[in-house]
Image: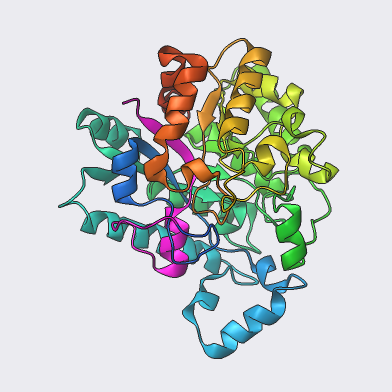
Amino acid sequence: MIPIFDMHCHPALKVYLCNAQFQKAHRPTSDYMPGGMHVDLPGLEAGGVKFLFATHYVPESGMKYMKNSSWLFRVLRWTGLKITHRFEPDEGPACFEKTLESIRGFNDQVTSAHNHFNVAVVKNLTEFENACDKGKTILMHGLEGGHHLGKSLTDEQYVANLVKLKQEGVCIITLAHFFPNALCGSGGGIPPKESRLLGYKRPEPSGLTSAGRQVVEWCQENGMIIDLVHATVEARYEVYAILDERKKSGKIIRPVVFSHTGVRTMVHPQMINELDRLVLPDTDELLKIKDYGGVLGMILMNYWQNGDNHQDSILISDKGIQPVIDTMLHIKELMGTVDHIAIGTDLDGFTHVPSDTKHVRYIDSLRQAIIQAFGEEDAQKICYTNAIRVLRQSWT
């Protein structure tokens, strides 16, 4: 069985936010069920997922103040539920401490499972290679959003916090998420139905901050993967400009990625919201990712694959994973190679997942579809070796 490398999924979010049990098997549930999990250790073992970026997300403070969510948060806080204390504070460095809490809590659950699963959380590339040699299921930490570094700090303090997080084993940082942070603006990423339900208003577009530019330079120099998902077009092109300048100056260039994404060309005309389309890379950006040696991890959420906002995994009539395969085929046709295609499911990220991959234990349906569309050799690249190449070039 070809191993799978998932470059973006959220079991750590469910552990942190809902005290979910990663080491226990879960039945497939609604995509938005807080205590349910689409990714757990028994499922990883059954599905042959051998490599995983466990993406940490402390919910941003902006989530508390959206038009239709602020009243709910006030009620939850009044009841004394602990979940309200797990959000990003409005000011100060405390989100950094909550990030450490999330990382260490996830580590504790993995450690408690060592007697039953051949699994390891690795903190650097040397540990990764050692775990590979032992045939372990390998988990690595990622961050979704620069807000995890804190607020109202100096540029140097943001970088210092990133250094500490790298020491904890963080190998990838998504610069942006749903709200502007100390590193850059947000391009959004909440689909229309959910945006209306929550009262989410997309922020005004903005690029990298001074701290954001320093973080990009630090990641390139010291070995951490930069993920461009959720960043504005302006911020993304500023990252490309930094890489181009480094290349011109003879400095090291490490691959950048879109860890969980679709492609802008494939969602038109069904994706009516033009600003949602801008969340996705266009043809020019795909070629830049190829030039930098990066990859595009395919998200298992069909709104971002074909633009149809009426799909739901509850419906038998949904299109399953075929839109994901269609996007992969488009990328291969454009680039002339599959060397820059990967997988980033976003499972457990409170997303609508295709009905045929409603839990990680069923991910063989994706594996088999990739083999059928691309053949065994290219399927190995898409499923795991492309992501490993990027990891080895970008992490130290």
* Residue name at image x 38 percent, y 65 percent: 20
Residue 338 spot, x, y in % from top left: 54, 16
Residue 38 spot, x, y in % from top left: 44, 52
In the picture, measured across the screen, residue 37 lies left or right of residue 288, that is: left
* Residue name at image x 48 percent, y 23 percent: 370
Q: Identify the coloring.
A: rainbow
- Asked if the stretch drawn in magenta spans residue 22, the answer is yes
Q: Quadrant of residue 220?
A: top right
Frontmost residue, 102 versus 279: 279
Frontmost residue, 267 versus 274: 267
The outermost residue toward the bottom is 78
- Asked if the stretch drawn in magenta spans residue 198, the answer is no
In the picture, measured across the screen, residue 200 lies left or right of residue 183, that is: right
Residue 7 spot, x, y in % from top left: 48, 38
In the picture, measured across the screen, residue 276 lies left or right of residue 380, that is: right
Quarter of the N terminus within the rendering: top left
Q: Is residue 170 above or below residue 87?
A: above
* Residue name at image x 28 percent, y 36 percent: 127
- Can residue 127 be seen by looking at this rendering? yes
Q: Is residue 284 above or below residue 196?
A: above
The outermost residue toward the front is 316
- The magenta region covers 1-28
Q: Quadrant of residue 197?
A: bottom right
The outermost residue toward the top is 336
Quarter of the C terminus within the rendering: top left
Frontmost residue, 94 versus 375: 375
